[in-house]
Image: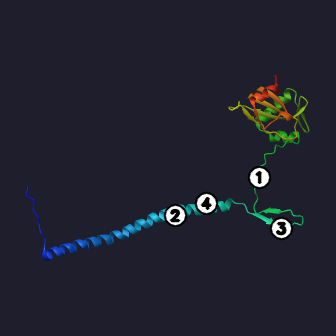
Amino acid sequence: MKVKVYRVSGITGIFLIFLILLLLVILALVALPIFLILMAIFGGYILLKYKVKSFFKKIWYKLRRKKIKIEDASTNGEIKINFAKRIEIEDNTIRANNITTLLNYLDENTKAFTYYLKNIGAEFREDGIYFKGFKIYPIFKKSYPINEIINLKYPDNIDAVVLGLKGEPYEPKFLYLIPKEFLKDRMNVSELKRFEIEL
């Protein structure tokens, strides 16, 4: 196979080299703006993604932040704090000052359990519920705890907690009378055995 070799010399060669260089310059001039536009779009996207996100986070933080005004106008060293906005504080205090307040506070299941206790001897008095000589607070748990830990929330002004466990509020399977001195916020089921009442 013969390979043909073309030689360009003289004015024709110079013209071709000049033409090639000119094409390269034109191509560079066309490509440069496109490249710069693409870089600007990419840079703008990155900037907006982080700057705008940070901007809105700051606004959200300022909206949620509660301003506190402290006045140094006391004569005895006390500090008076005035909140610029009302701050809602969740109150988990159990209201059981009297029988009406207590019954209104209880949920439907616990209220039904309370009437079950009344049927087996509990007394509804003006200041609360009494059972077997104790001023009690009723708690009903429909299901058996998986980790065998029961959370107990009760008011301070009681002598004992009556816990109904499993079954229905009007017919619990287990009943426990736990005096206040033995009460804890979290009790293991095994700890309750000694306080079980035979039904």
Answer yes or no: is residue 90 visible. Answer: yes
Q: Which residue occupies the extreme bottom position in the image?
A: 11
- The kind of residue tagged 3 is Asp
In 3D space, how far apart are the residues under numbered discs 3 and 2 (Cα atoms)? Answer: 44 Å
Q: Determine the image quadrant of residue 28.
A: bottom left
- Residue 128: x %, y % from top left: 88, 37
In 3D space, how far apart are the residues under numbered discs 4 and 1 (Cα atoms)? Answer: 24 Å
The residue identified by callout 2 is 48
Q: Secondary structure at mark 3?
A: loop
Q: Residues within 10 Å of mark 2 (few under 14, many from 20)?
A: few
In 3D space, how far apart are the residues under numbered discs 3 and 1 (Cα atoms)? Answer: 25 Å
- Residue 139: x %, y % from top left: 79, 34
- The kind of residue tagged 4 is Lys
Asked if marks 3 and 1 touch (Cβ < 8 Å), the reply is: no
Q: Residues within 10 Å of mark 3 (few under 14, many from 20)?
A: few
The mark that comes first in sequence, 1 or 2, is 2
The residue identified by callout 1 is 89
Q: Is residue 191 above or below residue 72?
A: above
Viewer-nearest residue: 14 or 19: 14
**Residue shown at the point (14%, 77%) measured from the top left:** 11
Judged left or right of residue 99, residue 88 is: left
The mark that comes first in sequence, 3 or 1, is 3
Viewer-nearest residue: 115 or 161: 161
Answer yes or no: is residue 168 visible. Answer: no
The residue identified by callout 4 is 57
